[in-house]
Amino acid sequence: MPKFLHVSDVHLGFDRYDSRARTLDFFFALKDVFEKYALAQQVDFVLIGGDLFEHRNIKPAILNHAQYCLRLLQEANIPVLAIEGNHDNAPYGTKSSWLRFLSDEGLLKLLEPGNVSAGDPFYSHWDEEENRGGYIDLDCGVRVLGSSWYGAAAPRAIEQIAEALGELPTAPGPSILLFHHGLEGQIARYAGALRYREVLPLKNAGIDYLALGHIHKSYVEDDWIFNPGSIEANNVEESQFERGAFLVEIDAKGKITAELKTDYQQRPIVRLTQKMRTGDAIESVEEGAIELVEKAIKSKKIIPEQQPIVELRITGTVGFDRLDVDIKQIQKQLQEKCQALIFLLRYDVDSADYASPISADASRLEVEQEVFTDLLSANGVYKPRAAQLAGGLIDLKDRQMEGEGEESLYELVEAMLATDS
């Protein structure tokens, strides 16, 4: 009964947020997945459905990460079968990629269709001496076929693959196709996704397990299309996706059982939301944020010792100039409080827009009253007494213009701002 591990979208070398520790997270996640679900489970082979790397051009340290993980499997005689994704295929103007390098080193088998325009067959069997081929028949009785990154040309490529499948010798058992693309309807804002009817020719041509990559969310369609998602979240939004690695078994009758494994080393990601209201004072931005984070720590939603990634989104409408808040200072304070590796503070508030209609024949006094009232209403502290304070400001202005002394004017201001006035 064949057993294998299916991972995709590993993104070794992830370097957003300019954090070395975050880059290492992706290495530790892959290492843990291989140790727990390939080595410990003694799988027959491992599939990588594209995007092993974050970039087409990688640093030496990132190559070392890949080599270390792949050697764990090599030493256990577990073959790794891979294809290139859009992140790690050959850079423009070159004919080779780092996956090709790893394949030439014998650490994985990069399954690629042949160059049909040059007279090569679309699919040729894997050649161990040349380290080249488009498909392989494994000792466990499974045929695995590769593909390339096709982008918008994927529907046409599927037709070519389905046609090529019909020209191959009979498979020894179940057939698996590695294909880096996504299905329609799985995530929002994904242009170019494939419709189910566009991939159906592959099933009709004999594919029993379509091993996808590209979308970072796990999903299964009709028990023959499988996408494990990324093994680490590439952004905070992806933390809400179910993601991981598929541990798959195929029984003697061809029934496929794929279990999504998520219990491995990953950086915790916590998302918090603070809702502001128009009447809130400017101080409540910082006070509310601190209270929210402290509550999350107390409830163990945030565990400082784990150095999580924390996102705090402040939303709503405020009754003051939103730019008067020192967001960087608040962000630094909160990051220290919860010991976050990365603290993302999203300040997405709107300032209240106060504008009272003034008739064309309004008197000067009425215009002044409305202008002062609008200005005061934009501040959460003064809003409840805006109309009263507006009258006081008009009186203050008139007295100043009449030459009244500063001491008397200060006394008037103090009286206006007194809580019992």
Image (cartoon, helix red, strand yellow):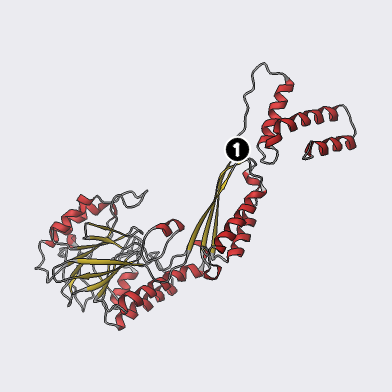
| Residue under the image location 41 percent in, 57 percent down | 240
| Residue beneath disc 1 | 352
Q: Is residue 140 above or below residue 384?
A: below
The residue nearer to you, when weighing 146 against 331, is 331
Farthest residue toward the top? 361
Q: Position of residue 296 (x, y in %)?
A: 55, 60
The percent position of residue 181, horizontal first and vertical second, equals 29, 57
- Please indicate whether residue 236 sits to the left or right of residue 368 in the image: left
Q: Is residue 320 above or below residue 45?
A: above
Say left or right for 354 vs 163. right
Which residue is located at x 62 percent, y 24 percent?
357
Residue 45 found in image quarter: bottom left
Q: Amino acid at mark 1?
A: Ala
Q: Element under label 1? A: loop
x, y percent for residue 362: 68, 18
User: In this view of the protein, which residue sits in the foreground, 146 or 393?
Assistant: 393
The residue sitting at the bottom extreme is: 75
Q: Vertically, is 315 above or below 302?
A: above
What x and y, as percent, mark residue 66? 37, 74
At 67% from the left and 32% from the top, the residue drawn is 374
The quadrant the C terminus occupies is: top right
The local crowd at label 1, few if under 14, some if 14 to 19, many if 20 or more residues have their Cα within 10 Å, is many
Q: Is residue 195 left or right of residue 168?
A: right
